[in-house]
Amino acid sequence: MTELALMLVVFILSFVIGYVLISRVPPLLHTPLMSMTNAISAVTILGALLLFAQPSMDLDEKVLGAIALITAAFNLVGGFVITDRMTGLFKSHHEPSGGGGKK
Amino acid sequence: MADMDPVKILIDVGIIALLIVGISQFRTPRGARRGNATAALALLLAIVLVLYRNDIVDVGILAVSLIIGGLVGTFIAMKVTMIQIPAMVAFQHGAGGIAACAIAYVELTRATPPTPVGEVSGYLGLTIGAATFSGSMLASAKLAGKLRQTPTVLSGHNAILLAMLAAIIGLCVYASTGVGVPEAATTLSAALVGALVLSVALGYTFAVRIGGADMPVLISFLNATAGLAAAFCGVVIQNQLLIACGATVAASGSILTAIMCKAMNRSFIKVLSGGKMAVAALPAKKTEPKPKKEEAPEAAEPASADTDDKPSEEIEKKEEQAKPETKAEPKTRTPEEAMAEAKTALREAESVIIVPGYGMALARAQFQVASLSKKLEQMGKKVAFGIHPVAGRMPGHMNVLLAEADVDYDLLKEMDEINESFASTDVVLVIGACDVVNPAAINMPDTPISGMPILNAHEAKRVLVCNLDEKPGYSGVPNSLYEEETTLLLFGDANASVTELLGSLS
């Protein structure tokens, strides 16, 4: 039961902290924000990795595990890369573009 | 798995703290870039730790899968243009959904059953993951223009959804009799696969009746459900990091969903259940009550991309045909006269606000618009962009489109920030936007957009409208801005109109 309580606390606390932080993100950055949180939701990759930490795996477990890994890795890497590209596009004449220019 | 080793907990907390630092840097574009890198680092650390702490079997499969997923993800992310971003993000939501779904399935069919709480979470992870997958794929196809963007409403749509939901719950209850019972493995798999397939169908049916300008709500909602599926997976495998990340993403998706709904003055339920706004409730004074042809308003948008090569005479003719119908035409101008007057107005203006809409992106006019704004600035005019929260196909989409076209982000002003400035502005240039500048939202009751916050373009001294045609926007409400005396209508391909305006300045 302490497990359940702990998980519940973690969920609620994360939701609240996330809510407070994300409410302050300016609309200017809403697309990169969603793109990044999308990448963060690919944290399921940890679960996919743990599937491969079992003493023995059936064939169908291996197949599903591989599917989970491929999709999660796609989501994770793609999400962070596209967010990086996108945030790099924002430029201002008033501050020197430190973002390293294009792409 | 669920050991309470203090070192382990401390490291997990450290990783979560790093993620929080990453998100909290989303204040400025440069901070956001750093924040993104910080969050990526946090997840990389988490992955390395999991690999380090556990004995991994089948390292080969694992490595190959990671490399394939990572490479494909990187390749696509490097190639997409900003107009494709919503489709790309929706596609990634879908990928996350599959991952959650596959993990939940494997965990539920284990010989060692999860705890009761874990089991219920497993069903939730499986079904929400599957529904997120199909809903996202459909959304992605619609956003990429592979499918019609118009909402499809089945008869008894709600009843169908409810029946599916009931069947899914039934199958999960049935499956629960077989969890952890080796003899019942086939029954369990069959029940779970059944629930999975139905969830896929549910996600599709759910998303199919949302389209067009409502897409930002759908994509935000799917962001939240992808996070939720991840969090439930975390409960099954008792991994606090998954729960924390999933909950944060769910919070983010919920906030964006709420912001989008508010910006359209529509309730979440209405967006999800109607697809279409209450078109029948239009005021009777309209010449031709827009019938429930769902296609019409929406089809107007993609058309602007496809009909770039449409001869302008055709457009002019169409406009002239429409003229006799619109009552109280303030001043009859030919398109040439309107364009000439627009050029003069723009040249003489001291302050200009540009209001872009998705039509601008469809006409691929953002690069010309960026050049125009630079030119106007060089001529010493005050230039700003007025960005409506729902402009585009996902939250904040218009900003990245303009950033890609190299518009200074200091010029991008959100609605609340710029709305007071319209009254003192010489020229407003509306480009491919309709509903978000329709004064009917303010002064006409009982239209689908009544009460929706708009950009007060009508308060400016002069309004130039570079839209494809006089057809109403997604809402189907005729734009009363077009009838204002101060408005000049430059119908036709936005790219061509803007290019002509730009040409007249040099």
Image (cartoon, rainbow, N blue to C red):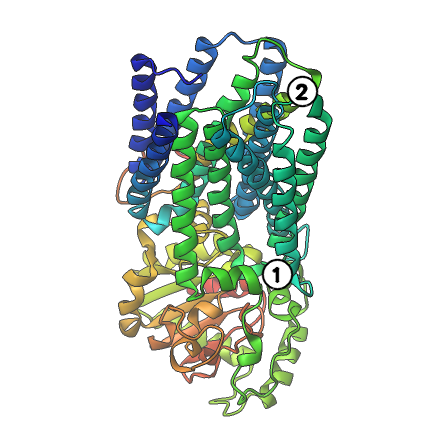
Please provide percent x and percent y for residue B442. 38, 77
Q: Quadrant of the N terminus of chain B?
A: top left
In this view, the residue in front, B485 or B35, is B35
Please tell me which residue is depicted at 64% across the width and 34% down the height of the picture: B175
Q: Is residue B397 placed above or below A63 in the rendered structure?
A: below
Q: Quadrant of the C terminus of chain B?
A: bottom left
Disc on res. B126: none
The residues bearing labels 2 and 1 have C-alpha atoms spaced at a distance of 38 Å
Type of amino acid under label 1: Asn
Q: Which residue is mark 2?
A: B182
Which element type, helix, strand or loop, lies under badge 2? helix
Please provide percent x and percent y for residue B134. 63, 44
Q: Which residue is mark 1?
A: B158
Q: Answer few, some or many: residues within 10 Å of disc 2's Cα (few below 14, many 20 plus, some between 14 and 19).
A: few
Horizontal arrangement in the rendering, residue B55 relative to residue B158 (left or right): left
Q: Are marks 2 and 1 in contact (CB under 8 Å)?
A: no
Please tell me which residue is depicted at 69% across the width and 40% down the height of the picture: B197
Location of residue B336 by image quarter: bottom right
Horizontal arrangement in the rendering, residue B433 relative to residue B155 (left or right): left
- Report the label total: 2
Residue B399 in view, yes or no: no
Type of amino acid under label 2: Pro
Please provide percent x and percent y for residue B15. 34, 23
The chain carrying label 2 is B
Residue B182 in view, yes or no: yes
Location of residue B303 by image quarter: bottom right
Image depth: mark 2 or mark 1 in front:
2
Which element type, helix, strand or loop, lies under badge 1? helix
In this view, the residue in front, B454 or B209, is B209
Q: Answer few, some or many: residues within 10 Å of disc 1's Cα (few below 14, many 20 plus, some between 14 and 19).
A: some
Nearest to N terminus: mark 2 or mark 1: 1
